[in-house]
Amino acid sequence: MASNLWGNVYYKNSFAGILSQEAGGRYIFTYDESYLHHSLPAISYTLPLQVEPHLSEHGLHPFFDNLCAEGWLKNAQARALSLRRGDRFSLLLAFGKDLAGAVSILDPDPIRKIEIDHNDPDNIAALTSRSSLSGIQPKLGAIKEGRVFRPAGRDERATYIAKLSSPTLPDILGLEYITTRACAALLPKDLVVEMTLAPLQGISKRALLIKRFDRSEDGKQIHFEEFNQLLGNHSDDKYEACYEDMADFIIQNRDICLRAECDTLFRRIMACILTGNTDAHLKNFAMEHTHIGLRLTPCYDLVGTACYRQYQTLALGIEGIRNMTIGSIGPKNIVRLGKLFGLPDKAIMLAVSDLASRLNRAHSAVKASKNVDQHIKEKLHQQIKKDGTEYSTQLGLTCQRSDKAAQRTKDLSASFGRYSWIKSTDGFSL
């Protein structure tokens, strides 16, 4: 790597500027004059086009920090370079060719050789493509050729992300697959990532292959930012927020965002709660940069983590209240969250009613999923039924209020009350 730690930043195929590190740990990103002259897009909402350098006194700029690999892949990268795992900029320089979105970061003068363990096929595949992916699960970039999936090569941009089995979370691949199918059933008008369970050539007989929404069919880059980036948070701060912070961003940026997407986002969070997705943090929601502004990307990273006993706490808070367990979420929280999203009572009631009416379809989608063990399906069935029954019961108790407020709550209770008939008519043997 360049001895003074600096890298060339590209937006798609255009040289956008230079990212460098100064003594003392300050980072500087400066747009290239030619890039500014051609009126090309800003690479990030938090890095607007300007002649003056963008400074970051405490670590990498949040936009770049969130592009760094996490978990298993970060550890593999650090071992390959004989670096500390905390040396994020060095890792990003070495493995910044294929990043999330449309930005690449390339080292102009690499001096450190990447040592790949050729006795470990996973290690070879993960490091060859020079890519960085966030998330703690073992994962790497992949390409689909006909019906076969293979690891992406060094000069290729992956069009799929391949998630591999986790040694600490059994059945995580099957659980993400069926949770995603359940959410697609709950949110039929929304966009949900495409995925399949299939072998990854030369690596594993079973992987979860997820089609990248930030790549076109021919591998061209599509730019997006996670909400963690949009809100100016570093990667490690992805849990330090509340769900309504995302809605606030949309509302406050009405010149580039659609207020109506607050309703879409609210429904997504509801679907996460219903399926036990307690790990829905700020890196698991994102917006695409389009020619007309920022728009929500498809739903992704949908995992019913509450099926594991150790993951019962919601990733984000509601109205400033943090560390809420999923079992403690009741109708008051849901109604209040909807109001924090700027939704009128009728919109909240309609969202709840829509989701309640599709719970059986979610169960059916889980039941019909192939290549997933029955015991993990039963866990997700139980999670969906448990939350639905609890909401139905609790909503009935909230009706003891003032006449006007009580009528609104009764209307919401009627919507949530549809959960109760799942208990007797869903037809599943759990």
Image (cartoon, rainbow, N blue to C red):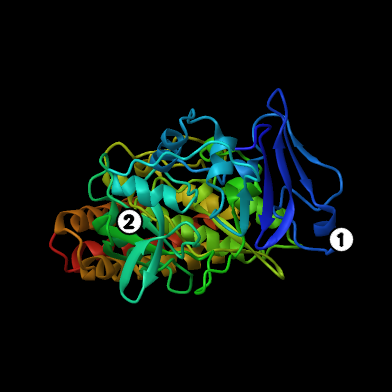
- Give the mark count: 2
Secondary structure of residue under mark 1: helix
**Foreground of the two, 170 or 73:** 73
Mark 2 Cα within 10 Å, few/some/many (few <14, many 20+)?
Answer: many
Name the spot of residue 255 as percent of width and height, x first. 77, 62
The relative height of residue 8 versus residue 161 in the rendered view (above or below) is above
**Foreground of the two, 50 or 243:** 50
At horizontal 52% and vertical 69% (from top left) the residue drawn is: 219
Please tell me which of labels 1 and 2 falls first in the chain: 1
**Foreground of the two, 236 or 121:** 121
User: Which residue, given by chain and number where applicable, does mark 1 sit on?
Assistant: 37
Three-letter residue code for mark 2: Glu
Name the spot of residue 192 as percent of width and height, x first. 44, 67
**Foreground of the two, 77 or 155:** 155
Secondary structure of residue under mark 2: helix
Three-letter residue code for mark 1: His
Name the spot of residue 112 as percent of width and height, x first. 53, 36
**C-alpha gap between disc 1 and disc 2:** 45 Å
The numbered mark at residue 176 is 2
